[in-house]
């Protein structure tokens, strides 16, 4: 199978073929998602929430991200693997950011990195791109800034923030980003951004007018059910599947039905 590259995504935008992206943090799940045909696997710092049980993404370290990225890279044959640079590993200065991005590429074998933020980090993105590392931007609700926002509510509903977001999107394209994630903003604004720039725009809680969609795998498969924003569509209820299966296992152990003679040596 031909691998998905940043060029493939650009061609998909041109051909108006929507891009399907999901998060992945471990080998076994990543292999299933890759085999199912997902175009992009994002090793998101949302691993902090869904893998580690933290309240925010801020505790994630570069070593954590590299570990998860290695697990995912080991699994894939087709998908493009993009890895979040975690909080505190790129905001200080562009040299520090480049060192972080290089570690992710070299130690995990990732295909690109994602950074949160607009014009403030544009120079940093330019420097990373200059080193030959593909960069995905991320605007709107950027969870690493949650203590600045104060809540996880929809961003850019006011004219001023919407205009800044559009300007930031153009600046990120100019800086050399190969794609852009828009998180939790009005659908109309996301459509406008998508039409205003030439790089693929991938939305989460950003309506249907973008060039693609991304969801956290655990939300989409119904492994996590205490997180219920309207933008999550559940394609399975793996929580019920798993609890049911484990319940049957416990019963079988208790009743000595398991293991049978066939399952014994
Ligand atoms: O970490 C993450 O899962 C993300 C996506 C929601 C875009 O950044
Ligand atoms: Na993230």
Image: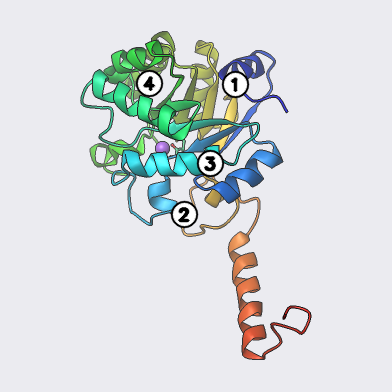
| Disc on res. 5 | 1
Tags 2 and 4 touching, CB below 8 Å:
no
Q: Disc 1 vs disc 2: which is toward the camera?
A: 1
Q: Where is residue 142 in the image (x, y as percent from the top left)?
A: 36, 34
- The Cα–Cα distance between marks 1 and 2, rounded to whole angstroms, is 32 Å
> At numbered mark 4, what does the secondary structure look like: helix, strand or loop?
helix
> At numbered mark 2, what does the secondary structure look like: helix, strand or loop?
loop
- The Cα–Cα distance between marks 4 and 3, rounded to whole angstroms, is 31 Å
Q: Name the residue under label 3.
A: 72
- The Cα–Cα distance between marks 1 and 4, rounded to whole angstroms, is 26 Å
**Upstream in the sequence, badge 2 or badge 3?**
3
| Disc 2 residue crowd, few under 14, some 14–19, many 20+, Cα 10 Å | few
Tags 1 and 2 touching, CB below 8 Å:
no
- The Cα–Cα distance between marks 2 and 3, rounded to whole angstroms, is 24 Å
> At numbered mark 3, what does the secondary structure look like: helix, strand or loop?
helix
Residue at the right extreme, as displayed:
262
If the image is split into quadrants, where does the C terminus sit? Answer: bottom right
Q: Where is residue 8 in the image (x, y as percent from the top left)?
A: 63, 18
**Upstream in the sequence, badge 4 or badge 3?**
3
| Disc on res. 165 | 4
| Disc 4 residue crowd, few under 14, some 14–19, many 20+, Cα 10 Å | many
Residue placed at 54% from the left, 37% from the top?
73
Residue placed at 53% from the left, 18% from the top?
194
Q: Disc 1 vs disc 4: which is toward the camera?
A: 1
């Amino acid at each position: 199978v031909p691998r998905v590259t940043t060029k493939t995504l650009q061609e998909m935008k041109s051909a108006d073929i929507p891009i399907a992206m999901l998060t992945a943090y471990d080998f076994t799940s990543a292999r299933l998602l890759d085999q199912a045909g997902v175009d992009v696997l994002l090793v998101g710092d949302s691993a902090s929430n869904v893998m580690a049980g933290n309240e925010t993404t801020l505790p994630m370290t570069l070593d954590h991200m590299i570990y998860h990225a290695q697990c995912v890279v080991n699994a894939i044959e087709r998908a493009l693997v993009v890895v979040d640079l975690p909080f505190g590993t790129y905001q200080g200065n562009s040299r520090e950011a480049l060192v972080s991005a290089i570690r992710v590429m070299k130690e995990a074998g990732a295909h690109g990195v994602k950074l949160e933020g607009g014009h403030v980090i544009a120079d940093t993105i330019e420097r990373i791109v200059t080193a030959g590392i593909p960069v995905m931007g991320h605007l709107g609700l950027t969870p690493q800034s949650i203590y600045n926002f104060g809540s996880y509510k929809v961003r850019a509903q006011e004219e001023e923030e919407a205009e800044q977001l559009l300007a930031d999107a153009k600046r990120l394209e100019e800086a050399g980003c190969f794609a852009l994630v828009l998180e939790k903003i009005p659908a109309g604004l996301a459509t406008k951004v998508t039409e205003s720039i030439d790089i693929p725009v991938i939305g989460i809680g950003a309506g249907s007018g973008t060039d693609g969609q991304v969801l956290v795998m655990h939300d989409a498969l119904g492994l996590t059910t205490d997180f219920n924003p309207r933008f999550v569509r559940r394609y399975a209820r793996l929580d019920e599947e798993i609890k049911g299966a484990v319940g049957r296992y416990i019963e079988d152990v208790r009743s000595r039905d398991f293991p049978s003679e066939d399952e014994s040596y």
